[in-house]
Amino acid sequence: MRSQHRLFIPTGLLACISLAGCLTNTPDPATGGIYACVDDLDCPGEQECLQKVCEAVKLPVLQIQNPESEEKYLFGNANTDILSVSGANLILRSRSASNEPVPGEGHLVVFINGQEAAVIDSGDISAGVLANIDIPNTPGAHRIVVQARLNDGTDYDNETAQARRIVWVDDGREHVALRKPWPGDVFGLDSQVIEAEVVTLGGIEIGPPQTMREHVHVYYDAPFPGCLIDNPMCEVGYNGVVPSDEDAFGPVLLPASSAGMVSLTAVVATFDHLTYEDDLGEPVFSAPIMILRSDAQ
């Protein structure tokens, strides 16, 4: 069955945008048309959806080979590493050679904690390509993202065109971070339940509350550690437990919201839902991640 989220365009508004044909939502490969889409199910044959248009190419697939997931770097060191990325369906081409948005071509942009750190625009991605990266000397979690990008500067928006890693800078203390959702993930405005996943560093062994081990409370748009200090109800005001008694993930409740960026923070709790304290008597909580609430997903 085809997707019910098909983009319908009034006949009077259809315009021929190239010699290949006109934009349409009626899949008929024989017509040679260009098809509007929301996802791959809206595209005819083996075409794939790129930026709401069906393209007759396979879209990029990326994997980070190095560093490994949750790689540990020692605090106080100059933590320079070699990023290794492999993949398929992308011919790397520099923007100086071409700035045309040719599906199947482009370059890779590397981000560390949301900041651009490197560009990879040459080599054979199927054999693997490399870039030097510096991991900031700050204890806790750091996020590496590799994004495939068309040479006009727009991102490939298929899910496999982005590869992600969380790595740690280890100062000997306990840390927690949200792996899912990821900063910048987009959710609708209605109240909804989402899955959350966490990772930890140090001696914390998390499990569902029924296992009598520590677990994680996820808080929505609450500042930490100020929330625990200033608001007596903060400790019990969490929106989800990870892992839950039913599942390794959340669930975490996102309340109905207006459009905009909101924060999620992971805080380690004891099995009886009190805030966990480390050997120094301090709570263990993540840096907040920002997600987008939007009516245009």
Image (cartoon, grey):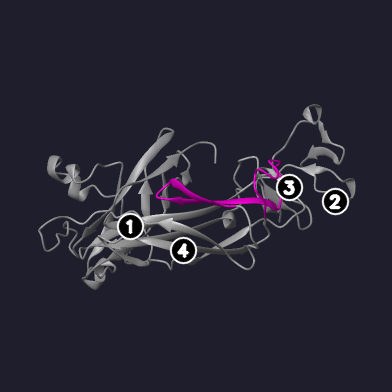
Structural distance between the alpha carbons of marks 4 and 2: 44 Å
Question: Does residue 190 appear anywhere in the picture?
Answer: no
Structural distance between the alpha carbons of marks 3 and 1: 37 Å
In the picture, measured across the screen, residue 266 lies left or right of residue 90, that is left
Quadrant of image for the C terminus = top right
Structural distance between the alpha carbons of marks 3 and 2: 11 Å
Element type at mark 1: strand
Between 214 and 184, the residue placed more toward the observer is: 184
In the rendered image, which residue does mark 1 sit on? Answer: 141
Between 265 and 140, the residue placed more toward the observer is: 140
Q: Amino acid at mark 2?
A: Pro
In the rendered image, which residue does mark 4 sit on? Answer: 82
Q: Earlier in the sequence, mark 2 or mark 1?
A: 2
Element type at mark 4: strand
For residue 296, which quarter of the picture? top right
Seen at 45% across and 45% down, the residue is 184
Q: Amino acid at mark 3?
A: Cys
Q: How far across and down, in percent of the image, does residue 251 sit?
A: 37, 57
Structural distance between the alpha carbons of marks 3 and 4: 35 Å
Structural distance between the alpha carbons of marks 1 and 4: 18 Å
In the rendered image, which residue does mark 2 sit on? Answer: 29
In the rendered image, which residue does mark 3 sit on? Answer: 54
